Image: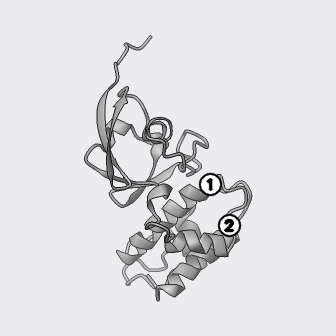
């Protein structure tokens, strides 16, 4: 039996607000967000980092919240689906997912949207993917194949993939490229 590790204060910056939570050191970020901080948007799908339902942004990078400990995220900026909107104004990707029906049951949608936010930022910074035709050249406008590759860590059991790609494509075109 593992030795008991008592809860200790852990301060997390979640969606722009500081939260001091009493957490046992082995609590995942996902469980801390959902069960202690009340941010239930990120979902527990596989709890093994294979489905992407728990995707959140940490310092602008997408991560699977089920695969990291909450104590490891102190002094970092955590953004969940709840933190993407600005007041009553949805994030452009949230709006596009609605307009293009980029969800069916909706379970994977928060992780899909957080991943898409990171995808756009990665592309703006010129990060290549496995589908990038020539990594020596500036990144061209993202193709649908490139979007699919960059979203491949997020699974949708309902199969809304074409609508998800259409939503991301719409945001890219509205913003005049990445």
In depth, the one of 59 and 89 nearer the eye is: 89
Query: Residue at image x 30%, y 35%?
Result: 10
Q: Position of residue 3 (x, y in %)?
A: 37, 13
Instruction: Name the residue that disc number 1 marks.
Output: 108
Q: Tell me if residue 170 comes above or below residue 148 in the rendering.
A: below
Circle 1 SS class: loop
Query: Residue at image x 46%, y 45%?
Result: 65
Indicate the quadrant containing the C terminus: top left, top right, bottom left or bottom right: bottom left
Query: Residue at image x 49%, y 46%?
Result: 39
Query: Residue at image x 47%, y 65%?
Result: 85
* Residue 31 appearing in the image: yes
Q: Position of residue 161 (x, y in %)?
A: 68, 66
Could you tell whether 99 is left or right of 69 in the image? right
Indicate the quadrant containing the N terminus: top left, top right, bottom left or bottom right: top left
Q: Which mark sits nearer the N-terminus, 1 or 2?
A: 1
Report which quarter residue 154 is drawn in. Answer: bottom right
Q: Position of residue 11 (x, y in %)?
A: 29, 40
Report which quarter residue 95 is drawn in. Answer: bottom right
In depth, the one of 6 and 63 nearer the eye is: 6
Circle 2 Cα neighbour tier, 10 Å, few/some/many (<14 / 14–19 / ≥20) = some
* Residue 153 appearing in the image: no
Instruction: Name the residue that disc number 2 marks.
Output: 161
Circle 2 SS class: helix
Q: Tell me if residue 154 comes above or below residue 91 in the rendering.
A: above
Whether the residues at callouts 1 and 2 have beta carbons within 8 Å, the answer is no
**Alpha-carbon distance for marks 1 and 2?**
11 Å
């Amino acid at each position: 039996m593992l030795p008991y590790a008592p809860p200790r204060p852990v301060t997390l910056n979640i969606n722009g607000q500081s939260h001091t939570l009493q957490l046992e050191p082995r609590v995942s970020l996902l469980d801390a967000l959902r069960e202690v901080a009340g941010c239930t948007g990120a979902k527990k799908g596989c709890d093994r980092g294979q489905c992407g339902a728990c995707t959140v942004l940490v310092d602008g990078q997408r991560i699977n919240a089920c695969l990291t400990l909450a104590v490891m995220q102190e002094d970092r900026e955590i953004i969940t689906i709840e933190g993407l909107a600005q007041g009553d104004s949805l994030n452009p990707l949230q709006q596009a997912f609605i307009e293009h029906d980029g969800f069916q049951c909706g379970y994977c949608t928060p992780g899909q949207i957080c991943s898409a936010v990171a995808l756009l930022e990665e592309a703006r910074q010129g990060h290549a993917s496995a589908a990038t035709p020539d990594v020596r050249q500036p990144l061209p406008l993202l193709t649908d194949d490139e979007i699919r590759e960059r979203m491949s860590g997020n699974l949708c059991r309902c199969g809304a993939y074409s609508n998800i790609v259409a939503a991301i494509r719409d945001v890219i075109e509205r913003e005049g490229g990445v």
